[in-house]
Image (cartoon, coloured by chain):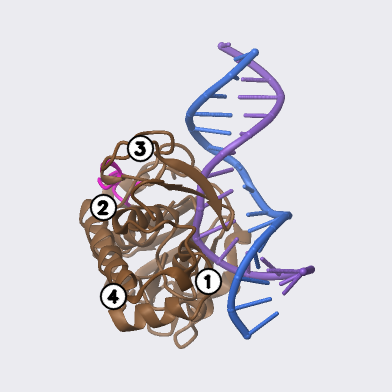
Chain colours: A brown, B blue, C purple
Amino acid sequence: MPELPEAQTIASALDKAIGGKTVQGIRLLRRDFLKTGAPRDLTALAGQRIQRVFRRGKSVVIVFAARRVVLQLGMSGRVYVAAGAATAEPLPPHTHIVIACTDGAEARYANARRIASGVHVLAADELGPLARMGPDANTIGRAEFIARIRARRTPIKAALLNQSILAGVGNIYADESLFRAGIRPTRAVTAVSDADLARLHGIIGRVLAEAIAAGGSTIKGSGKYADPHGEVGGFTTAHRAYGRYGQPCQKCHAKLRRTEIGGRTTTYCPHCQK
DNA sequence: AGGTTGACCTGGACGC
DNA sequence: TGCGTCCAGGTCAACC
């Protein structure tokens, strides 16, 4: 499930592969993935130059002079790049958009599931789904982080997952950050001190930075993530909480517990996380 | 208005 | 081996 580090890895690879290049043609293979804009808005990008590709929250944004194309990856979104002879290879399953550049490079957006996924073709000054996003979780300042979290009256984990408060944190990095901070995910924001929020802010920044450096996390099973070159994420082995319920805590050896917050499976250590 | 819940979707893991 | 069942979860809409 691509969260900020996985989206960052994809956006960086895509920027390197097609940034600055001119589009020869764009194919839309499955129309119902287009959430904003018309199919012809997309195909009309032929001949246009891709200025750059960047990440915002968990989304990948492809920038043209007069348009932006936002790829929401959802749970199972993947992007592949191919160049030269590789473009002759069959398209990966569930490929919905193919962007071919004049030099032969190709970017392919695939997505097996339609959950929380979609493509938005926006005007250059239009934000679309980006308008609802709070600041990126890896660059937000400490004071603003504390103020935005403080404004809520929910469990701390629900606040971290809320993209309008903070963009980019999903289930994996919420569980991992709260484990490292020793804060129980169910604890109300009102019961978390400023000092703990300040510490959590630093930990989230470090966890995301480490995950980006490792190329993200790959979870076995549905929507198995890999970067545009097929490399799986290296951060998975660093997981200490996510997906480890029933296994011993790596700090205290207590059995990790599972609960549910906002409909998401949540794993925590009943001893280390208060 | 903020908080919470459920729908959406389908591949893969797991059990018999 | 093959079938059935369950689980995963980001986003949005709807409701409280």
Q: Label 4 is placed on what type of residue?
A: Thr
Q: Which residue is mark 2?
A: A215
Q: Main secondary structure of the magenta part?
A: loop
Sequence-wise first label, 2 or 4: 4
Q: Identify the residue at horizontal 32%, vertical 65% (top origin).
A: A102
Disc 3, SS: loop
Q: Residues within 10 Å of mark 2 (few under 14, many from 20)?
A: many
Sequence-wise first label, 1 or 3: 1
In this view, the residue farthest toward the bottom is: A125
Q: Nearer the viewer, residue A87 or A210?
A: A210
The label shown at residue A254 is: 3
The label shown at residue A139 is: 4
Q: Chain of mark 3?
A: A
Q: Chain of mark 1?
A: A
Residue A152 seen anywhere in this rendered image of the structure: yes
Circle nearer the viewer, 3 or 4:
3
- Residue A102 lies left or right of residue A128; in this view the side is left
Distance from Cα at disc 1 to Cα at disc 3: 46 Å
Q: Nearer the viewer, residue A121 or A173?
A: A173
Give the quadrant of residue A202: bottom left
- Residue B7 lies left or right of residue A129; in this view the side is right
In the image, residue A236 lies in the stretch drawn in magenta: yes
> Decide: marks 2, 4 in contact (CB < 8 A)?
no
Counting from the top left corner in percent of width and height, residue C4 is at 71, 24
Circle nearer the viewer, 2 or 3:
3
Circle nearer the viewer, 1 or 3:
3
Q: Label 1 is placed on what type of residue?
A: His
Q: Is residue A106 above or below residue A45?
A: above
Sequence-wise first label, 3 or 4: 4
The label shown at residue A120 is: 1
Q: Nearer the viewer, residue A183 or C12?
A: A183
Distance from Cα at disc 1 to Cα at disc 4: 24 Å
